[in-house]
Amino acid sequence: MNAIILSALWGVLMMYTGFATKNTRTVSVVATLGVLAVLVVNWMEYLGVSFFNIDTKGMLAYNGFGLIFNTVVLFSTLVYFLLSGREIEKSGKTPSDLYALIFFILSGISIIAGFKSLLMLFIGIEIISIPLYVLAGSDKSNLKSNEAALKYFLMGSFSTGIMLMGIAFLYGDAGTFYLEGINAGLGAISPMKAIGMVLLLASMSFKVSAAPFHFWTPDVYDGTPTVFTSFMATIVKSAGFFAFLKLFEAAFGKFQADWQVLMAVVATLTLVIGNITAVFQQSVKRMLSYSSIAQAGFMMLGVFAMNIFAKQGMILYFAAYSIATIGIFAVLSKFKDHSIDAFNGFAKKHPLVAFSMLICILSLAGIPLTAGFFAKYYMLLAVIKDGNFLWLAIVAILCAAVSVYYYFRVVQAMYFKEPNNEEVLEFSPSFRFILLGAAIIILVLGIHPDYLTGLL
Amino acid sequence: MFAAFDNFPALLIWLPLAGGLISFFIKSEKVARASAIVFSLLTMAVMMTSLFFSSSESFVYNQVSYVWLPNLGSSFGLILDGLTRVLCLLTALVFPMVFLLVPGNRYPNANRFYALMLLTQCGLMGVFMATDALVFYLFWELALIPVYFLASIWGGEKRIKATFKFFIYTFVGSLFLLIGILYMYLKTSNGSFSLVAFYNVKLSDVEQYWMFLLFFIAFAIKMPLFPLHTWQPEAYEQAPTPVTMVLSAVMVKMGLFGLLRWLLPLFPLAVKQFNTAIIVVIVVGMVYASLVAIYQDNIKKLIAYSSIAHIGLMAAGAFTLKAVALNGAVLQMFSHGINIMALWIVADLIETQTGITKISALGGIAKKAPKLTIFLVVAAFANIALPLTNAFVGEFMLFNGLYQFKPWIAAFAGLSIIFSAVYTLNMIKHVFYGEVVAAVEGYVDINKTQAMVLTVITGLILFVGIYPDPFFKMMYETVGLIVNRYVTI
């Protein structure tokens, strides 16, 4: 509750900073302080200190899992602000508005962290989505950005419609919006509930860009200004997955046997399509869009298995995937040319940045001693634990092997090829330092994942 | 007093790791080389010392375990027993030799070169000593990553492609291994990754078959066994020679080691079920690789194919489950490491001086470099497994086991020995004897450092060939444990 209110208030504050000062650097500092404050109050709530006591009729309730998820997301946002603040300042005339939108999204994510009712789920998802449509189109003079915003908006509204219809079916069946109420009752799943469930599965799959509802992703991610793609592909996606997991655990946990096969199919499709398509991309930005689909496939395994390993793994996955992707996008957004060849000889020119980026890439590929390895480890463990789906684990590892192919093309360009790019890139000392810090966090979580998973 | 020496296994990992990390920050090439040599020699000294501080009554010599991830059921457990000692000794010997042989100015950014090499050593030591499946897996991958960078940065013309193929192959294999390990972990009674817990898991026949398959693919790719060997000749050819030495002398032993430590003891039912078929495939692969080796005109590729045949023999011997063959396989792992080192050294010396790797383009080196020729001939005899050389002891025992298993298989496998004589002697004849070709006119014989390293190798070849007893004393108890797994079923 702390985080929802503070981030909403800070969003309003951010809008006014635009009037108070023309210095964009100050705006960034205020925003960074804001996210830090939200992070702190959220952590205080985890420790049992709650500043607000609002009666939500049980529609919002926070437990350890939700608060830790929120902490991970807020921490990722902090890293994101620190690394990409300069880029946010450069995009659009008034960065204060853009920061405000991001804070509203954080407020929506905080609702998602504690929803107990379908109404809250819907409100949370919409509070996240609407500012995102604006962010996607924030580069107003760029046609691609406009196209991305429109596409995202149309497709997003469509999926929202499907979600509403699903909620209506569920309400018709159970007579309540509460998740427990939907999970209650004896016997097999009723047809109406089944329809509602499938509709929700489709709309949530859309939000997390799982196949076969992923078609919007590459175009939108590619058209959106890089700095916001980074936010969209990491923090927002994590929130989508958290909602997905929580919804299916709390509302349909009893019917796991009914939806598990469906979820396995979605996971398999996402893994295969995401990874195979990513192989053919020549632009790093597009490759990362497909890689985000591929990673979503791995996270789907967590939703699929839904046991203790899955929950621990999801939290670790959010952290590992978000920090690594934010790091890579932060470097990428400094490049004008987004092709893989632009990275040729990068390690010779900027060894420290290249090394940090290498750690991020190794983590995405799931190489041991990085957080990404243990994230995948937990997902595989969760699937194997489930018993009858060993084949799904094998599909997943084959896809992970494919992913090494495209991730390592960037490594090859950075380390083994001669520089051919005349573009002069400047990385400030603070940027290098923070990026290295992110890489160190990835390594620490790769050696001691229990620092994070042990919290659950 | 002996308790203090229990930390030996840990030192064998920490020393190369520390040396590797330090080396990244050394600016001067000379200092980097010196520090790498010092760290590798220190590691060797620790290894040598540990050989003398052991009680032979128990098969476990040194064991150490740190708390690492208690919630996950994994602890950082290391052991030095009979089997791992042989391999750690090999690892500890190979690296200083490689560092001594490579001139300091040969590779640009030498500090990184040495750093990555030492990290590889750290990974290899960890693989051999781990008693915890998760730790084993981490080191298994950790040994691969530095090698990938080493070969891709300093390798030959087609290095990026060849190395990437090697990397993808092994990575796929290790992911299968990961699935297997996770499955076993979930089957343990107390949720533990330790080797002992894995030994106590009761699996049904079908489960064993699946697990066997998952583990075996990983190990077979690493060795490599026919038909999964296609990454190997290219990778050996394209990697810089010091890396090739490490790859062929030590790294491929990871697969064989995995066979002995994990696969054979864990899945006895599946092994019994499949071993005849696997041995037949391996033996066919051996003969095939030997035939291909005969037709190679490139020294490096010849050595690579010859290695496939030799490794195949060890794997086939291990699958016979006869005590004599298993002992022979462990000894041969050591001997093959030493022999192939010698062959690579010779191939590298010739290539750096003449720039030629084609056998048909060379000739008459013996006239110009008599000292080198003496060493080469000893190494070549060892490669053919002539009596009094180290390989004779091991291969004799392996054939003995194969013969006990199925005489006709042994007879067929014997072809590869004959072929190995053909291609090895053929290579010597063409490269070292005959007319002196123009390219070797100005050939200079080996210098003192090279002579010293080659003398050590020759000494080892003859020592093990004449008096292998210390090795058997070291390993027979550990190998006996593997055989015992099969007595009870």
Image (spheres, helix red, strand yellow):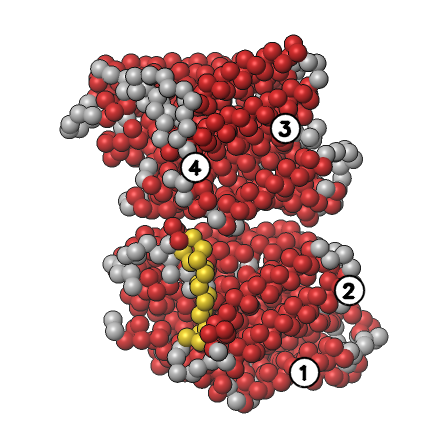
Distance between the alpha carbons at the discs numbered 4 and 2: 47 Å
Q: Chain of mark 1?
A: B
Residue B416 visible in this rendered orientation of the protein: no
In the rendered image, the quadrant that contains the N terminus of chain A is top left
Identify which residue is drawn at 69% across, 69% down: B37
Q: What amino acid type should be assigned to the residue bearing mark 4?
A: Ile
**Dot 1 and dot 3 within a common chain:** no
Q: In this figure, which residue is indicated by the disc labeled 2?
A: B30
Looking at the rendered image, the disc whose residue lies closer to the viewer, 1 or 2, is: 2
The lab-note entry on whether marks 1 and 4 share a chain reads no
To which quarter of the image does residue A406 belong? top right
Which residue is disc 3 drawn over?
A84
Question: In terms of secondary structure, where does tag 1 sit?
Answer: helix
Give the distance between the C-alpha atoms of the residues marked 4 and 3, in whole angstroms: 23 Å
Instruction: Identify the residue under disc 1.
Output: B455
- Counting from the top left corner in percent of width and height, residue A333 is at 65, 29
In the rendered image of this protein, does residue A130 appear above or below residue B79?
A: above
B182 to B290, vertically: above or below: above
| Badge number at residue A315 | 4
Query: Is residue B462 shown above or below A169?
Result: below
**Callout 3: helix, strand or loop?**
helix
Q: Residues within 10 Å of mark 1 (few under 14, many from 20)?
A: few
Q: CA distance from mark 1 to mark 2?
A: 25 Å
Label 4 close to label 2 by CB (< 8 Å): no
Between the residue at mark 1 and the residue at mark 3, the CA separation in whole angstroms equals 59 Å
Residue B94 image position (x, y, % from top left): 61, 72
Q: Is residue A317 toward the left or the right of residue A186 in the image? A: right
Left or right placement of residue A28 versus residue B102 in this view: left
- Per the model, the C-alpha gap separating discs 2 and 3 is 41 Å
